[in-house]
Image: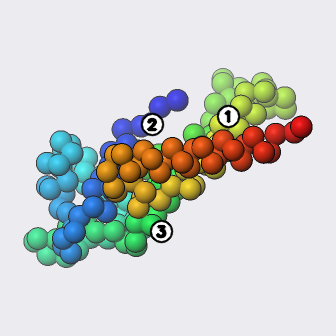
Amino acid sequence: MKITAQEEYGLRILIRIARCKDNEGLSILALSQAEGLTKAYIAKLTRLLRKAGYINSTPGNVGGYVLARPAKEINVNQVLKSLGGALFSKEFCGDYSGAMRFCNNSVDCSVRSLWQMVQFSIDQLLDKVSLQDLIGSEQNSENLLSNLFQAHLQLLKEAEPA
């Protein structure tokens, strides 16, 4: 499994915008310089984030991008899905059916069960992470995410049959 460049850079741009204290926000040029990406790529990512409702553009020559709502209300799982989609969705089997119209394993597929379980676990964990959780220091984020992960593991243990 891989996190795409679009998901990684899109999330990093969103974090950078969330950290910005300037009411005018961050311009494409400022984001480009800060992240070491082309202005065209930054423009593509900010367009995706704006269309998904995470950022707004401020007007004028000195305008830039600001969060559309508070960072604590922005769910990281939904951000990643808007940038690249889910790891596994119901359409997956139709998209990867091989040369035939329908997958040979469409009725009895143990691999589908695996991907559903992985997606469920990712969703359960990432649904608990807000953009606010990521705008502090790396140490603060690491501590918070470690605590979330430990709580997630505890819930899984409690859900196991005896």
Q: Disc 1 designates what residue?
A: 115
In the displayed orientation, state which residue is furthest to the left: 61
Residue 7 lies left or right of residue 31; in this view the side is: right
Residue 144 lies left or right of residue 158; in this view the side is: left
Q: Disc 2 designates what residue?
A: 3
Which of the two residues, 130 or 150, is positioned nearer the viewer here? Answer: 150
The alpha-carbon separation of the residues under discs 1 and 3 comes to 28 Å
Give the secondary structure at mark 1.
helix
Give the secondary structure at mark 3.
helix
Relative to residue 15, is residue 88 depicted above or below?
above
Crowdedness near tag 1: few (<14), some (14–19) or many (≥20) residues, C-alpha within 10 Å: some
Dot 2 amino acid type: Ile
Q: Disc 3 designates what residue?
A: 73
Which of the two residues, 40 or 126, is positioned nearer the viewer here? Answer: 126
Dot 1 amino acid type: Trp
Quadrant for the C terminus, please. Answer: top right
Residue 120 lies left or right of residue 50; in this view the side is: right
Give the secondary structure at mark 2.
loop
